[in-house]
Amino acid sequence: MSSFRAQFTSFNRPARLLMVNQFAINLGFYMLMPYLADHLAHGLGLAAWTVGLVLGVRNLSQQGMFLIGGTLADRYGCKPMILAGCVLRTVAFALLGLVDSLPALIAASAATGLAGALFNPAVRAYLAADAGEERRVAAFATFNVFYQAGILVGPLVGLALLAWDFTAVCAAAAVVFGGLTVQQWRALPARAPKNRTAEPAWRAVARDWRTVAANRPFLLFAAAMTGSYVLAFQVYLALPLRARELFGDRTGLVTGAVFAVSALAALSGQLRLTAWAKRTMSGPRAIAYGLALMGVAFLPLLPRAEGPVLGVLALTACAALLAWGGALLYPFEMDTVVRLSGDRLVATYYGAYNTASGIAISLGNLAVGALFDTGVAWLPWVCLAATGLLCGAAVAWLHRSGRLRPVPREGDLTVTAA
């Protein structure tokens, strides 16, 4: 704990503020979202297809708008987008507790997703710039501790508030984001955008997007890393499905324990793993090892003859290994995106990266669901393990072939006479 506190206080005030705010962002989000489907289905009595529609709109509006959010942050500054996202989520969460008509619920859900698309790339770009090249990895490691802590505490706070009703949960989440808006408006320094030009906005945006689309190393890296997001999401999909097979109606308790193990593993291991990786290996190698570990995490689920005790142990081992693999690669992953961008259009690159990850999660979930439907018990776990190992091998190949070398920043290039 003392080492974490020392590392946290070693950053300047804006970086510390963004880290604490990320805890609050996840606290507000996860105190509400895990219980939204139940509220829609049982509290409001909506049909299953409408519940899926409301939740799907939220995911689509967030994943589909990440690139827009990142572009706006690069053009108009990160702070305005962070504030806009927090204001929008304040309103959206308040609406979710007040409305009961399908159009209003869809609008509130879409606003919730759009809010995330506005502030997520902006927060990461601001933190990357504020930490600087030398401390970027350490900053993102500390940032992830707060991120995971919010995931751990949020559902517990939401569960306690449900003792009143869902409206109380929504009101509390809205208050959290309203407080974040005021805090960041008052305390977060504004940073002038580096990439704004005098040309028309549409032309500048088109040029920026062409720049990202032409960055082949970045595209290859983003493609290789999509597997990590598919694998990490299985805490929400494959592991609950396996828990249902083993425990039937007691699935909720087991799934909650799996969530807690995942968050606690990431919290306890993040700084140690990052420090060890920085001492012993390069960033791309740490990413490759993290991906491989995330793949190996699914191997304990292969045996089929275990009873409830061994089943819980297998699920717990999978969740812990997934969390440790993600903790190992995450700071170096975020640093690599900045390096491949040449430290230019960083929010746009983060936005494009998040959009690719969101598409991969959607397609990956369809594939995992289809694998479960085959009825071949071992097939989902073998395919998930292979995904991690293959993606790790892909990152290792990109590193060995020199494709992950940092892009020279503007002004770093010099011209020499022949």
Image (spheres, rainbow, N blue to C red):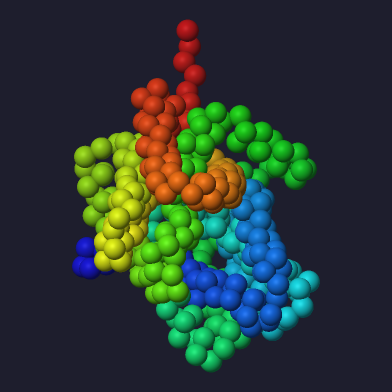
Classify residue 41 by image quadrant.
Answer: bottom right
In the image: residue 272, left or right of residue 354: left
* Above or below 169: residue 303: above
Q: Nearer the viewer, residue 140 or 128?
A: 140
Q: Residue at x 62, y 59 (%)?
A: 59
State the image coordinates of residue 357 (x, y, percent, origin top left). 54, 47
Q: Position of residue 379 (x, y in %)?
A: 43, 44
Task: Tell me where residue 307 appears, x and y as whole percent.
Answer: 29, 63
Q: For this rendering, which residue is in front, 341 or 290?
A: 290
Above/below status of 162 relative to 26? below
Observer able to see residue 332: no
Residue 196 percent across, percent down from the top left: 65, 45
**Quick check: 40 left or right of 378?**
right
Instruction: Name which residue lies at 40% across and 24% down.
Output: 402
Asked if 53 appears above or below 291 in the picture, the reply is below
| Horizontal arrangement in the rendering, residue 332 relative to residue 44 (left or right) | left
Front-most of 208 and 414? Answer: 208
Q: Is residue 193 above or below residue 59?
A: above
Foreground pick, 57 / 12? 57
- Left or right, 117 with respect to 259, comes to right
Residue sitting at 52 percent across and 46 percent down?
374
Q: Which residue is found at the position 64% from the left and 83% from the top?
A: 43
Please indicate, yes or no, whether residue 285 appears anywhere in the rendered image. yes
